[in-house]
Image: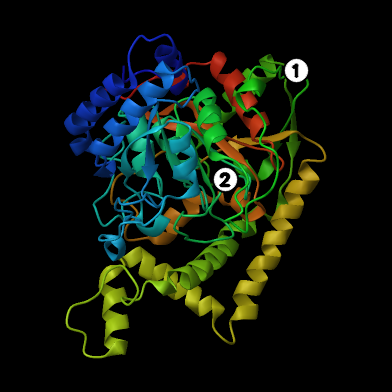
Amino acid sequence: MHHMTLAEIARGLADKKFSSEELTKALLARIAQLDPQINSFISLTEELALSQAKAADARRANGESGALLGAPIAHKDLFCTQGIRTSCGSKMLDNFKAPYDATVVAKLAAAGAVTLGKTNMDEFAMGSANESSHYGAVKNPWNLEHVPGGSSGGSAAAVAARLLPAATATDTGGSIRQPAAFTNLTGLKPTYGRVSRWGMIAYASSLDQGGPLARTAEDCAILLQGMAGFDPNDSTSIDEPVPDYSASLNGSLQGLRIGVPKEYFGAGLDPRIAELIHNSIKELEKLGAVVKQISLPNMQHAIPAYYVIAPAEASSNLSRFDGVRFGYRCENPQNLVDLYKRSRGEGFGAEVQRRIMVGTYALSAGYYDAYYLKAQKIRRLVKNDFMAAFDEVDVILGPTTPNPAWKLGAKNSDPVAAYLEDVYTITANLAGLPGLSMPAGFVDGLPVGVQLLAPYFQEGRLLNVAHQYQLNTDWHTRPPTGF
C-alpha cells in the first residue's frame, strides 16, 4: 500500500479495498522500520493517527466521501498541533506543546486527513540542506550520504521514501521546491496569502508560505485543495475564491506560452541539469506549448536582497524566544540580561544565530537605508520583471536548483555556497508568485527538478502543466532503491 499515491488511496478507500485504519497501521509500521535510516520524523503521533483513521472509516461508512477522508499525511514541525510538540527543529522549542491547531492542520483534519507525525526540518526553517535541525540531519533516500534539501527536508524525505503519500511543507526561499527537486517529488509553493500562515511559526513573515509536497501534481492538487482558503485570523490571507484544482488538471497545453529566462542558463548551472531542462521543454512542445526566450534582468540581485530581507524579518520574529514566555530557559540565570543571553545562546543553533545577527545589523540605525530599504527596492524590481514577463508568456520554466543534492556536510563551512543554491527559487518568494518543482531526470543517480512559475493565483495552471508533463514522462514514478 505504501506505493499508492493520494489519488489511488482515495479510490481504494472509496471502493472499500482497505480501510484507513489498515493503511495507517501499515504506514506506521513502515516508518518504525525505515525512518531510522533517514531521520525524517521528529515526532510520531500513533495514537492520534489511529483515532483519526477510525473516525474517517466511520464517516465513510455513514456515506461521506472526499479525497482526503482517511488519507495519511504528516506536518512539517512548524505547524502548531494542539497538545503535540511543535519544535521548529530547535532546542528552543523542544518542550513546546502548542495549545491550538494551525489553520492548515485544522482544515486538513476537518477534511478527514490522518496525521502520522511531525517531520524534521532545518531549525526555524533556516537552511537549504536540513542539517541545522536540533534533532540531527535528514538523509536523502536516493543516497544516504547526501542532503534531501531544506528546510522541508523531513517532509520530502518521508514522502520520497514511501513512508507516506504526501506532507505539508513551507517555502520561504525555495524550501518546498528545492527539497522536491532533490528527492524526485512534486512540490508547490502557492501565491503568498493563498494558504493561511496562522499557527505556522514564522521565519520571515512576508516570504513564508505553506504548501504541499507529494509524488505527483495530481496529489499536490488534492492536498492544496484542503489547505487553501481565506482565513480571517491571518491578516495576510487573501480573500480569493479557491478553484477546483483537480478539475483543471486535464486541460490541453495547446498554445500555452512558456517563457525561458536567458539568465537561468549562466555559468553557475550544472550543464547536465541544463540538458535535462531542455529535454523537458521539448516534451512540453510536443504537447502543444510554444516556447519563447525572455529576460529577468534583476534576477542577479535577488540573492543579496533576499538574504537581507529574510534575516531582518527573522531577527524581529525570533525576538520573542527569550527564555521568559515559553520555550527553552537557561539554568540558574544570574539576572535578566544573563537569562536573555544564555537562553538564546543555548537555545538557538549556529545558523539561526547567524541570521539573527545579520538581520539585526541590517535593521540597525545607520544601516537600515543602506541595506534593508535598498533590498526592498530590489524586491520591487524583481516583481516588475515578472509582471513584464507575464504580459508575454503564461508560465516561466527553468531549473529548480543549479546543482543536484550535495553530500552531507559539504557546505557547512561555507554558508554562502549553500545560499547560492537558492538562486532560481527565491525570486518567486520576493515577488509572492506561485512556483512548482517537478521531477525532470537524474544526474549521477540523484534527482533533478524543473521549476514552473505562474502569475498570482494561477496554481491551477502550474498543476495542469505538471500533470500533463507527468502523463507523458515517468521520472516521478521512480522510487529510491531500498525504499
Q: Distance between the residues labelled 1 and 2?
A: 30 Å
Q: Nearer the viewer, residue 139 or 192?
A: 192
Give the residue at x 45% y 30%: 214
Task: Give the left or right position of residue 232, taking residue 4 as reference.
Answer: right
Does residue 83 lie above or below 95 as drawn?
above
Q: Mark 1 points at which residue?
A: 254
Does residue 299 lie above or below 398 as drawn?
below
Q: Name the residue under label 2.
A: 195
Q: What element carries label 1?
A: loop
Q: Percent x, y for residue 377?
A: 70, 66
Q: What element carries label 2?
A: loop
Q: Percent x, y for residue 396?
A: 68, 37
Q: What residue type is labelled 1?
A: Gln
Give the residue at x 45% y 50%: 102
Does residue 121 lie above or below 243 as drawn?
below
Give the residue at x 29% y 23%: 21
